[in-house]
Amino acid sequence: MRVLPEIVGHDEFAALVIRTDYNDEAAWQAVATGLTQPWGENGEFMARVHLVDDPAWADATPYEVLSAVRRDENLSVVFVADRVTMQSADCALLACDVWADEEALDPMYYQELIDSPQPRGFRTAPAAVHDVHANLSIANMDFEEFAEEASADPEGVLRPFWATAASP
């Protein structure tokens, strides 16, 4: 397994997003823009996100990403902007549970990796990243609750709670 660079300057209150796909710059810009928008019911919260946009992470598997970020004992979730993210109409990032080793990713998205050890994860829209990060950081919700919400969506993508509460 390759050694990935250490992430420096990460604020524990900022969601950590690591780009691993470098095939579509416009798609990445759309993801980054979505992540930096104010969030909450009326956009009352400032987005705090640490974007890792370093080609050294190109094509890193979720397992490699987790191995690298586990150095940070305060981190509970990492968001990966991978090939699926860049090709998704929702720009759906992969949310990976930093401390769960036993369970597999949704095979719908990772058929090619089925034989290797995989982290537990689900897809999330950029606007929901902050809900996930904030609630996991303060242990208000657990990873399974978010994963269940994502699996209930027809596309398997977690949407922001404030957006779904406002819709009919």
Image (cartoon, rainbow, N blue to C red):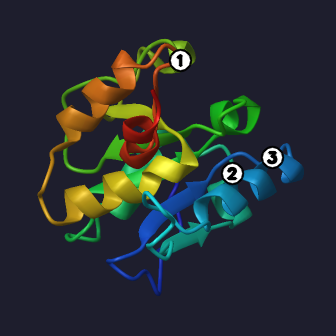
Residue matched to label 1: 155
On the image, the x and y values in percent for residue 137 come to 22, 64
Please indicate, yes or no, whether residue 101 appears anywhere in the rendered image.
Answer: no
For mark 1, give the secondary structure: loop
Direction from residue 77 to residue 112 in the image, left or right: right
Q: Nearer the viewer, residue 39 or 96?
A: 39
Quarter where residue 90 is shown = top right
Residue matched to label 3: 27
Q: Nearer the viewer, residue 78 or 129?
A: 129
On the image, the x and y values in percent for residue 59 come to 66, 43
Nearest-to-viewer mark from 2 and 1:
1
Q: Label 1 is placed on what type of residue? A: Glu
Direction from residue 21 to residue 107 in the image, left or right: left
Q: How many marks?
A: 3
CA gap, disc 3 and disc 1: 19 Å
Q: Earlier in the sequence, mark 3 or mark 1?
A: 3
Rate crowding at label 1 as few (under 14), some (14 to 19) or many (20 or more) other CA atoms within 10 Å.
Answer: few
At 49% from the left and 13% from the top, the residue drawn is: 154
At 41% from the left and 43% from the top, the residue drawn is: 95
Q: Label 3 is placed on what type of residue? A: Ala
Up the image or down, 72 lies above or below 92; here it is below
The furthest residue to the left: 139
Residue matched to label 2: 58
On the image, the x and y values in percent for residue 91 come to 66, 39
